[in-house]
Amino acid sequence: MSAMSTSPSAPGADATRLAPSLGRAWCYLVALSFRRQARARQMVWIALGLLGFIAAMTAVATAADQWRRPRYRQIVAERQAMIDAVRPGDPAQAIAEVASGVATAAVLPMPSDGEPASAAWWLGLMTGKEPRVHVVGMLPFWSSRPEDAPRVEAVVVAAIPPDPSGADRSLLGLAIAPDLGRARLAAALASAGLSAGRIILAQEPGEACAHALIDVEDYITDADPRLGAIRPVQRVPLVLGAYAVPVGGEPA
C-alpha cells in the first residue's frame, strides 16, 4: 500500500488568484466564439461577407448624408405640417399660409349662418386666384359619436383638389342678389339638377351682392354643366371643394 504525501499550500497562494471579473469573462466568451467559428470555415466567410456588406451600406449612406439632414428635414416638415394644421389663429391667415405652401392643410371652424361677411372665411376661397385652396374634408368624419363627445364641426382645407370617394358632397360658392332667399335659391338649384342641403348666406349691409355657401349632393367639379344652369346668379358658381360623407350618416 503506497502512501501519498501531501504538502501544505504555500502561504499567500490563494491571494495570488485573480478575482472574478465580468470584463475577462466577456473577452473569454468572445475569444471562444472566434475559436468555434474558426473550426467551421464556411461560417467565418459568411460572417466576413455580412460584415463587408454592412460596412459598404454604411459607407454609401454616410456619403449620401442619409443619417442626419435629409431625414431630419423630412421629419421636421411632416411635424410642422401637422402643427400648422391645428395651430390656433386667424382663418384668413391660415388660408394664406396654405396657399403659399407654408402649411400643408388647415382646420377651420364650420361656417355658421348669420355671421357677417367679414367673419365668413369661405369668401376667401371664392376669389378664384391661383393657387386655389379647396375644402378637402369635414370633421368629425365619424358621425356616430357617444353622448358626451364634443359636437364641434370643422372644415379641412388644402391647396390640392379633393379626390372623389364614391359618397361625397360638394360646397358651392355663389354670388347672388341680396333679395334672393333660400327657398328661391334651393328651387334654382333643383331646376339645375342639384340637390341642396345646408345653405349659408353672407352679406354686408349696403352691398349690392350677397354670397351663398351651399352644400350639395355628389362630387362636383368646375366643369360640371349643371353649374351653368343655375339661375339667377351674378357670376358662374365656383366649386369650393368636396368632402366624403361622414361615416354613419349625412350632414344636417
Image (cartoon, rainbow, N blue to C red):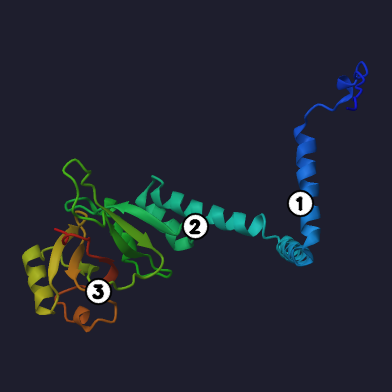
Q: Tell me the CA gap for discs 3 and 1.
A: 62 Å
Give how far across and how far down residue 153 sits, in percent. Answer: 24, 51
Q: Earlier in the sequence, mark 1 or mark 2?
A: 1
Q: Earlier in the sequence, mark 3 or mark 1?
A: 1
Question: Mark 3: which amino acid?
Answer: Gly
Give how far across and how far down residue 38 sits, in percent. Answer: 81, 59
Question: Mark 2: which amino acid?
Answer: Val
Cβ atoms at labels 3 and 1 below 8 Å apart: no
Q: In the rendered image, which quarter is residue 69 located in?
A: bottom right
Marks counted in the figure total 3
In this orientation, which residue lies closer to the viewer: 131 or 83?
Answer: 83
Q: Work out whether 114 lies above or below 22.
A: below
Residue 102 disc label: 2
Q: Secondary structure at mark 1?
A: helix
Give how far across and how far down residue 228 sits, in percent. Answer: 21, 81
Question: Mark 1: which amino acid?
Answer: Ser
In this orientation, which residue lies closer to the viewer: 151 or 90?
Answer: 151
* Mark 2 Cα shell of 10 Å, populated few (<14), some (14-19), many (≥20): few
Residue plotted at (24% across, 56% down): 142
Q: Is residue 216 left or right of residue 131?
A: left
- Specify the farthest residue to the top: 11
Screen quadrant of the N terminus: top right
